[in-house]
Image: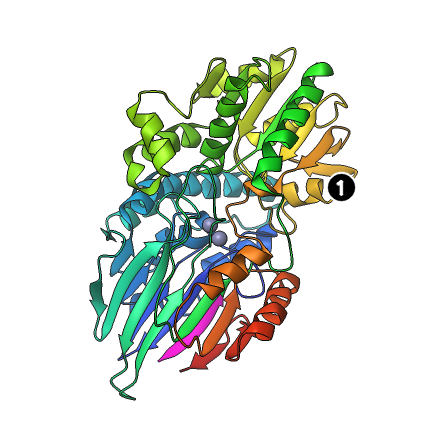
Amino acid sequence: MKITFCGAAGTTTGSQHLIEVNQQRILLDCGLYQGRRHEALERNQHFPFDATKIDCVVLSHCHIDHSGNLPNLVKQGFVGNIYATTATRDLCAIMLPDSAHIQMSDVEWLNKKRKLTGEPLLEPIYTKLDAQNSLQQFVTVGYHRTLPIADGVKLTFIDAGHVLGSAQVILDIQDHATGKQHRLLFSGDVGRPNTDLLVDAEPSEAVDHVIMESTYGGRKHELAARTSEHICNIINTAIDRHGKVIIPAFAVERTQQLLYTLDKLSHEGCIPPVPTYVDSPLAVDATNIFRLHMDSLKPSVREALFMQRDPFGFDGLKLIREREDSQKLNDLIGPAIIISASGMAESGRILHHLRNNIEDRRNIILFVGYCAEQTLGWKIREGWPRVNILGDQFQVHAQIEILDSFSGHADHDELLGYFDRIGGAKKNVFLVHGESERANALQAALQERHEGRVEVARLLQEVTL
Ligand SMILES: [Zn+2]
Ligand SMILES: [Zn+2]
């Protein structure tokens, strides 16, 4: 059996790992690489393998850094099955066409400039039609339902507690060439324990090899209990200054988590009634999908849904789909909360809200999620005094706040706890999905407590087991 780390090695985005065994090629995740525009275009367009030779894809969860290059894989001739949980499939059904839309408008924007300079025009990585085509190839599998997916290979999904439908992937592999039996665990992205909405990542047994994420190696998140206090202060500060709170948030899961918290806070009287807008058609759709997949939610949330009290709604909340309604927010006077995508502020309606609000000292920009290096969100988080938004320079005068406790990712100690709950010899551990510094920090800690091999995977590294 051979593993090649084709993405999310030394970085957090573009998750893709190729497993070759018994003349079969199984791709774990087919994520989009997000970063500098030109490098991203180049890396996403060209796979380091022949798409027509992939037999099947196993998808850990819906996030674009894991699923976002599937339409391109299909466009380049992949005809096999894409195995995913039902919730992951449903979320991909709204997220992949949305991603196509972003690719198409990105290229349109670049081409406007290219037309003026006479440079050759660019093609989008994929279109909405490619996204639709890829959705035809999904085969859904429930948690704990073991399924043969290739010669000598069985797949089992267990919950990863990271986003609705997120899974850890267990592959039971009978390697005919060597006669060896392997159990490989791919963690996907690992969620924090004890969150409001999702169940905790499940433990696994008798694991031989682990491919594990390391996003927050060496980092500690704020305690969940402090989050409510912190968010209360932020909102009340902005209201006192007649300012706005602008929250770049992923449409899926983070937005629902925020709504759940804001609902709780206003119920408890910690924040006064304040107009709150979710400005993202995708977030509105995603919220509906959450309601369809209650089995993945915490029992308390399920109960709330059964009791007919909407945990994703409260007085003063407006969900915005239409562009005209979104534009009206530009003229909004007085305190308000605007939640909009994308979470890394790379695209989407959040860019307009940042343009409108970033130069006003009364406002607060609140980051509630991870931002990959070089994205606009990362630059603002890092404290850049000036940033470019949609082609124009803006001074950053708004107050910047960061709440990492909302993270969908386990922090350092939580990752160690997760690792300890993986049963078996864990002879080979490969760390992926982390910037080098983060992955190295986790490697050092794991090596202290574990005798097996623990390595930080390198891009295009091949390992034979
Ligand atoms: Zn994820
Ligand atoms: Zn990820």
* Residue drawn at x 77%, y 29% as measured from the top left: 397
Q: Main secondary structure of the magenta part?
A: strand
* Residue drawn at x 38%, y 67% as measured from the top left: 185
Residue 187 placement: quadrant = bottom left
Task: Give the image's coloring scheme.
Answer: rainbow
> For the magenta stretch, what is the residue range?
1-7
- Location of residue 451 with respect to 405 vertically, above or below: below
In the rendered image, residue 292 lying in the magenta stretch gets the answer: no
* Residue drawn at x 43%, y 21% as measured from the top left: 313
Give how far across and how far down residue 84 sits, in percent: 30, 53
Residue 48 seen in the figure: no
Residue 396 seen in the figure: yes
Give how far across and how far down residue 72 sits, in percent: 38, 54
Residue 288 placement: quadrant = top left
Between 391 and 339, the residue placed more toward the observer is 339
* Residue named by callout 1: 383
Q: Is residue 32 left or right of residue 114?
A: left
